Amino acid sequence: KTADIGVVGLGTMGSNLALNIAEKGFTVAVHNRTSAKSFALRDDNPGIGDNVVPAASLEDFVASLKQPRLVLFMVPAGKIVDDEMAEIAPLLSPGDVMIDAGNADFHDTVRRSKAVEETGLQFVGMGVSGGELGARHGPSIMVGGAEATYGLLSPILTRIAAQYEGEPCVAWLGPDGAGHFVKTIHNGIEYADMQMIAEIYGIMRDGIGLEPKAMAEIFADWNTRGLSSYLIEITAVTLAETDPETGRPMVDVIVDEAGQKGTGRWAVIEAQKLGVGATTIEAAVSARGVSSRRAERADAGALYVDIATEAGGFAGDAASLTELEEALETAKIIAYAQGYATMAAASDEFSWNLPLAEIARIWRAGCIIRSRFLDDIARAYDSGETVVNLLQAKDFVTRVSAGQGALRRVVAKASLAGIPVPALSAALAYLDDYRRKRGTTDLTQAQRDLFGAHTFHRLDKDGVFHHQWPAV
Ligand code: NDP
């Protein structure tokens, strides 16, 4: 049997993606360094397995593929991708396509594209979101590479992607690194979204004294309105869960140290390089870092006892809960605006012409940040108005104006009570900084000119100026 596509790497994502492809009626060749996994994938999945072609060697794997061959890698990012590609490349023919579908740093994707295309092969860098279940039943897929190469993949990708009201959540987003860059920002937004939800959970727990099961009901209720999203849905599910061993709420027995694999950090680094303030993402990445220093936090906690000036005044009544809901919704808009501003800046910097409305559309299903809210973002970019930043789009101006009072009160109360809200407060600070006509960096420029003759511009004259400051 000749295969339509080959998958290398049958871990969590690769095996599920291969089954998804097979289930949609395509024949998929599979290869794994431990080849027993390839045969098990065929044998353990009756029915679907008929479309799986396991290969014991790379030579067999390559020989089983239709030409031009499509070889999709789903292995851990970094050197392993380079090693796997180097091993297979000599067995391929001009025009064949190598696809890195893992979470790559987009700089690596740009480098690999160039190197691969010089050899006559084609390269695609493709972000896949949705975790294990997404890979199996429909992920959101962000593709970067030559548009014509995408044409070779699209018959398969449009079938295996998540479908949102009949539209597949996959798109060609631009050349070389565009797909992996967008996936990186997706993950950055995911970090910010999760951190802000965790901060609201912290207020509910430490400011109001709610039990996880009561919180679960509140989040489930919020999931019926504006905040409706996969992340709010799973927040309710996780908070409602009981530990079978102790009978206590599951969250109460989980250690408060967050892991991370680096995509949030990549997003922050790229935003910084592009001169965009993605401060909510930065706050989320930092918060995970601080969380991992658990023993150190306990020591610091012993040094700063009762430092909070007030209880904060959080209450569990309906009005207070609505205030939390509005604050989270407003901060979420600001976090997404920062993620989108980063993509817009990258699009200019790398001449990618990223389709920002389309990106919102392919995130509506399949991926971790999926939500109906993304429809509003797509509408803003589709509306015909020039959107410099989502915080200047009409609909969002209205919503942020209405919700900023709640965000201010929540951040203020949390600060007085000593409850950390780094991402919510970063969102508020960004809003205030972004909307301020007269900033404070006139002073920064004066200082820079004093100590380094870095010069400055004047409000009343064109040109570049240096002042003779008093000697200090
Ligand atoms: P796993 O760890 O589950 O699987 C990794 C696969 O790569 C396995 O098939 C493994 O082979 C193979 N592999 C590992 N090391 C080597 C090596 N040195 N040489 C050759 N093959 C190797 O990873 P995931 O499936 O979770 O992740 C794959 C990619 O997808 C990563 O880039 C990840 O960031 C990305 N991703 C993961 C998501 C998730 O939710 N897990 C979501 C979205 C993207 P073996 O079976 O022999 O160990």
Image (cartoon, rainbow, N blue to C red):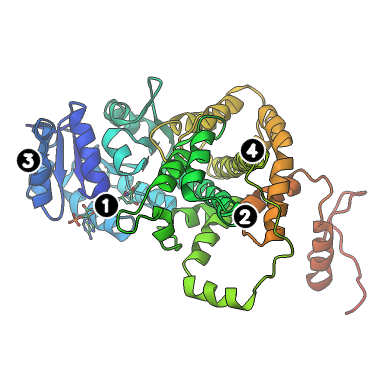
Quadrant housing residue 282: bottom right
| Secondary structure beneath label 3 | helix
Mark seen at residue 75? 1
Height in image: 88 above or below 228? below
Dot 2 alpha-carbon crowd within 10 angstroms: few under 14, some 14 to 19, many 20 or more? many
Return the residue at label 3: 43
| Secondary structure beneath label 1 | loop
Residue type beneath disc 1? Val
Nearer-N-terminus badge (2/1): 1
Whether disc 1's CB lies below 8 Å from ligand 1 is answered yes
Image side of residue 265 versus residue 5, left or right: right
Residue 389: horizontal and vertical position, in percent?
65, 37
C-alpha separation, residue under disc 1 versus residue under disc 3: 22 Å
Observer able to see residue 251 = yes
Looking at this view, is 254 or 420 the one in front?
254
Residue at x 53% of width, y 27% of height: 375
Mark seen at residue 207? 2
C-alpha separation, residue under disc 2 versus residue under disc 3: 53 Å
Mark seen at residue 203? none
Residue 412: horizontal and vertical position, in percent?
73, 53
Return the residue at label 4: 318
Residue 98: horizontal and vertical position, in percent?
27, 43
Height in image: 239 above or below 261? above
Nearer-N-terminus badge (1/4): 1
Looking at this view, is 428 or 183 the one in front?
428
